[in-house]
Image (cartoon, grey):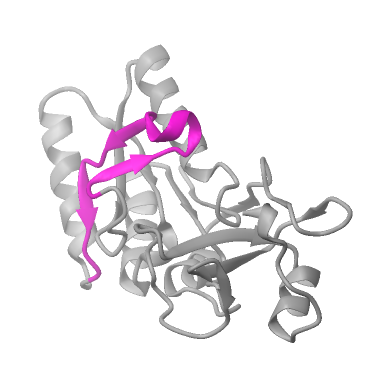
């Protein structure tokens, strides 16, 4: 039976790259139909899923953007599944980027698709925001996903004296760490950037026990 998977990590850990690799392997080597999606909330790069590798040249246009309303994602996926079946090219897998931005209803819709249509769904996302608060989508994926795994490909804190795993996303505004504000602030301009850091560094920065070295970002 198919499963609902959740793959989580801090930013810059290679989640989108892994998603694009899976899509490529399914289509190139197995000639299988894939749906690649992301929530409409994520306005970075418009309708594209993009890897940070090769200066953003590795990318793929989403089949559609996810809206948060109840049953919307379920009904849209069912329509795509029925259309693909009628064309003799059934959907083999659904891949979702920036899954933290999904609504609770979106996650339940994915669980329905997996169990009712036996189609695996892999959702990639962030566990918590820049202030240590859980995202709605991630919270419900942790609750419902049958297979949960941390992506740790490049999740290393570049600020700590010794190499440590990054578990927090530090928000920088004009190069300075901030610890309050809107949960959603897309990294799409020169003012807002994010840096993956370990909890030790995050706490020291938050409570004024250290400053961020300028040569680290």
Give the quadrant of residue 60.
top left
Q: Is residue 59 left or right of residue 86?
A: right
Please tell me whether residue 47 is drawn above or below residue 208 in the rendered image. above
In the image as oriented, which residue stretches furthest toward the top? 29
Q: Is residue 24 left or right of residue 77?
A: right
Q: Residue at x 68, y 53 (%)?
A: 215
Q: Residue at x 68, y 46 (%)?
A: 152
Q: Residue at x 72, y 62 (%)?
A: 213
Q: Nearer the viewer, residue 34 or 194?
A: 194
Give the quadrant of residue 195.
bottom right
Q: Nearer the viewer, residue 217 or 73?
A: 217
**Image quarter of the C terminus:** bottom right
Q: Nearer the viewer, residue 78 or 72?
A: 72
Q: Is residue 194 left or right of residue 37?
A: right
Query: Which span is picked out in magenta?
Result: 46-68
Query: Does 14 appear in magenta?
Result: no
Give the quadrant of residue 137.
bottom left
In the image, residue 180 lies at what x, y percent? 52, 85
In the image, residue 108 lies at what x, y percent? 36, 66
In the image, residue 45 lies at what x, y percent? 29, 48
Please tell me whether residue 21 is drawn above or below residue 76 in the rendered image. above
In the image as oriented, which residue stretches furthest toward the right? 162
Query: Does 66 appear in magenta?
Result: yes
In the image, residue 182 lies at what x, y percent? 41, 81
Q: Residue at x 56, y 41 (%)?
A: 14
């Amino acid at each position: 039976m198919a499963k609902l998977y959740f793959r989580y990590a801090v930013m810059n850990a290679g989640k989108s790259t892994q998603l694009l690799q899976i899509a490529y392997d399914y289509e190139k080597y197995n000639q299988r139909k894939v749906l690649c999606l992301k929530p409409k909330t994520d306005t970075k790069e418009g309708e594209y899923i993009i890897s940070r590798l090769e200066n953003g040249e590795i990318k793929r246009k989403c089949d559609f953007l996810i809206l948060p309303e109840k049953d919307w994602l379920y009904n849209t996926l069912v329509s795509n599944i029925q259309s693909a079946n009628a064309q003799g090219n059934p959907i083999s897998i659904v891949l979702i980027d920036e899954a933290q931005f999904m609504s609770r209803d979106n996650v339940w819709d994915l669980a329905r698709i997996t169990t009712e249509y036996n189609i695996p769904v892999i959702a990639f996302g962030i566990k918590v925001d820049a202030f240590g608060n859980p995202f709605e989508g991630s919270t419900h994926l942790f609750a419902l996903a049958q297979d949960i795994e941390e992506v740790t490909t490049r999740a290393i804190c570049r600020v700590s004296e010794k190499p440590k795993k990054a578990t927090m996303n530090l928000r920088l505004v004009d190069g300075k760490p901030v610890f309050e504000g809107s949960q959603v602030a897309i990294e799409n301009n020169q003012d807002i950037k994010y840096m993956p850091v370990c909890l030790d560094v995050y706490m020291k920065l938050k409570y004024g026990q250290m400053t961020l070295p300028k040569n680290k970002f």
